[in-house]
Image: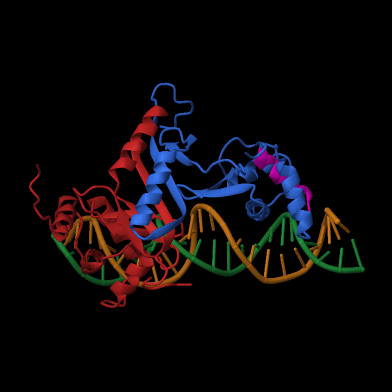
Chain colours: A red, B blue, C green, D orange
Amino acid sequence: MTSDIEIDPRQVLKDYVSKNGLKLTRQRELIAEVFFAAGAHLSAEEMLERVRAEDANISLATVYRTLKLLTQCGLAEPHKFADNHTVYEPARGDEEHHDHIICKDCDQIIEFFDERIERLQEEIAKRLGFEVVDHRMELYGRCSKTDCPNKKH
Amino acid sequence: MTSDIEIDPRQVLKDYVSKNGLKLTRQRELIAEVFFAAGAHLSAEEMLERVRAEDANISLATVYRTLKLLTQCGLAEPHKFADNHTVYEPARGDEEHHDHIICKDCDQIIEFFDERIERLQEEIAKRLGFEVVDHRMELYGRCSKTDCPNKKH
DNA sequence: ATTAATGCAAAAGTTTTGCATCGTT
DNA sequence: AACGATGCAAAACTTTTGCATTAAT
């Protein structure tokens, strides 16, 4: 039974940075703040847009570099879905791995987890002589037609 | 019960082309031949390499255009795995959909299908108010260490 | 003879990198 | 003061496209 101590991601970043002789710049703090605040899976472009609302001078390169840094800290997790961008989601340390279901109409992404599927994946891999180190599962579909929040089509 | 008539992919391509007022060029035939012969999931670059063994003048653009054509015929199916390229696999018409398990050591890709997982995916989607139109599942792992055919690392 | 397909080079889209300059430690 | 980070522009990388030319029907 692990005690559920809330970890402050700002602190994690701060520690990582100082532990590695890196520097905590205004840009990094801003980008991290936007990232932590986002409730969604954002692409680098989307992050840039939000970050530029605060500081119009921040460059896309810095966003990419900072997202890479956040990934190294274990704070961000990159995902490549069927479209072309990589999106980043806040990594929730101890929490369980999850998969995604994506609405083709409105692009919303819902996370889910199913223990039974996880077990079947392990079983299949074992049968094929594999040891699973990672997996990815995405369902693409259409959410209930009428109340779809922000339909594209 | 569908009778298992072997369909010749060359014929499928021929029919599609003539039915649509397109033309069956030397390049298309060569690229299609290489594609049908490949036992593996090939990227456009890899196809180009093989095709150029026969005709050094064929362009990458034509490979891309032909792969798109083959996809439209229902003969090829594009997949995007965790690395960056799209790879194409021969579509096996009536056969059932399948998923992939990929060895991180030797890059081999094995296909599998599990009815139980398919059912669970449907169940989960329904619970979340989605109708599934597509899905993708990939397991990444390591195949049995000792007899791995072409280990990279 | 039509008109689609080719090859080339240029463009597009995402991510990375070199470099001079700036800012944190 | 030292040296890591930034912004910019250019490069890398995969895929697409415009266009003059070639070739299948």
Q: Is residue A101 magenta?
A: no
Q: Nearer the viewer, residue C11 or A39?
A: A39
Whole-percent x, y for residue B107 in the image: 46, 36
Q: What residue is drawn where x is 41% and y is 33%?
A: B105
Whole-percent x, y for residue B125 in the image: 37, 55
Which image quadrant is residue A14 in?
A: bottom left
Q: What residue is drawn where x is 77% and y is 57%?
A: B19
Q: Main secondary structure of the magenta part?
A: helix
Looking at the rendered image, the quarter that the N terminus of chain B falls into is: top right
Q: In this view of the protein, can residue B57 be seen by the observer?
A: no
Give above or below for B121 relative to A103.
above
Q: Nearer the viewer, residue A5 or A19?
A: A5
Residue B18 appears left or right of B4: right
Give the residues in magenta.
B24-36
Looking at the rendered image, the quarter that the C terminus of chain B falls into is: top left
Whole-percent x, y for residue A19 in the image: 15, 50
Q: Nearer the viewer, residue B109 or B126?
A: B126
Residue B77 appears left or right of A12: right
